[in-house]
Image (cartoon, grey):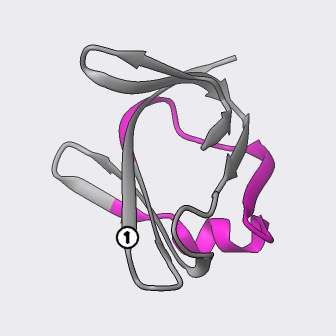
């Protein structure tokens, strides 16, 4: 569950509009089994290019939460995919369109 920045559900999908730097707060909730935070994978893509953000974000994991107070993001439009598995190996992936503007 993305708590910050605000996610808007639109016909074309889930959209996050924010400025940089921004606060990022994501909580991972148990469904059928406990969340395996070691399986967290976050990637960003723009056009043909894709980059893993997992190693940059892992230091901000506390328990089952991901919190970054001042996340610097380049301006532009990106697709962000957050994938995580539970203790049984069942994966969940969510993709968001991220629109970032300067303050």
Q: Is residue 65 above or below residue 102?
A: below
Which of these two is toward me, 44 or 96?
Answer: 96
* Image quadrant containing the N terminus: top right
Which of these two is toward me, 51 or 35?
Answer: 35
Magenta-colored stretch includes residue 79: yes
Which residue is found at the position 62% from the left and 20% from the top?
102
Q: For the magenta stretch, what is the residue range? A: 51-80
Q: Residues within 10 Å of mark 1 (few under 14, many from 20)?
A: some
Pointer 1 residue: 91
Q: Is residue 34 above or below residue 8?
A: below
Percent coordinates x, y for residue 30 in the rendering: 61, 64
Which of these two is toward me, 89 or 93?
Answer: 89
Q: Secondary structure at mark 1?
A: strand
Q: Is residue 34 above or below residue 74?
A: below
In the image, is 73 to the left or to the right of 85? right
Percent coordinates x, y for residue 89 in the rendering: 40, 83
Which residue is found at the position 67% from the left and 73% from the top?
58
As drawn, the residue found furthest toward the left would be 48
Which residue is found at the position 45% from the left and 85% from the top?
88
Percent coordinates x, y for residue 36 in the rendering: 58, 80
Magenta-colored stretch includes residue 21: no
Picture quadrant where residue 96 is located: top left
Which residue is found at the position 37% from the left and 70% from the top?
91
Picture quadrant where residue 3 is located: top right
* Image quadrant containing the C terminus: top right
Which of these two is toward me, 25 or 69?
Answer: 25
Q: How many marks?
A: 1
């Amino acid at each position: 569950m993305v708590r910050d920045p605000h996610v808007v559900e639109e016909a074309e999908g889930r959209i996050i509009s924010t400025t940089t730097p921004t606060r990022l707060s994501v909580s991972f909730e148990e469904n059928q089994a406990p969340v395996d935070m070691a399986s967290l994978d976050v990637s960003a893509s723009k056009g043909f290019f894709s980059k893993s953000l997992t190693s940059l974000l892992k230091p901000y994991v506390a328990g089952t939460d991901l919190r970054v107070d001042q996340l610097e993001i380049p301006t532009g439009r990106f697709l962000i995919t957050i994938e995580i598995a539970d203790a049984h190996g069942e994966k969940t992936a969510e993709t968001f369109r991220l629109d970032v503007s300067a303050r």
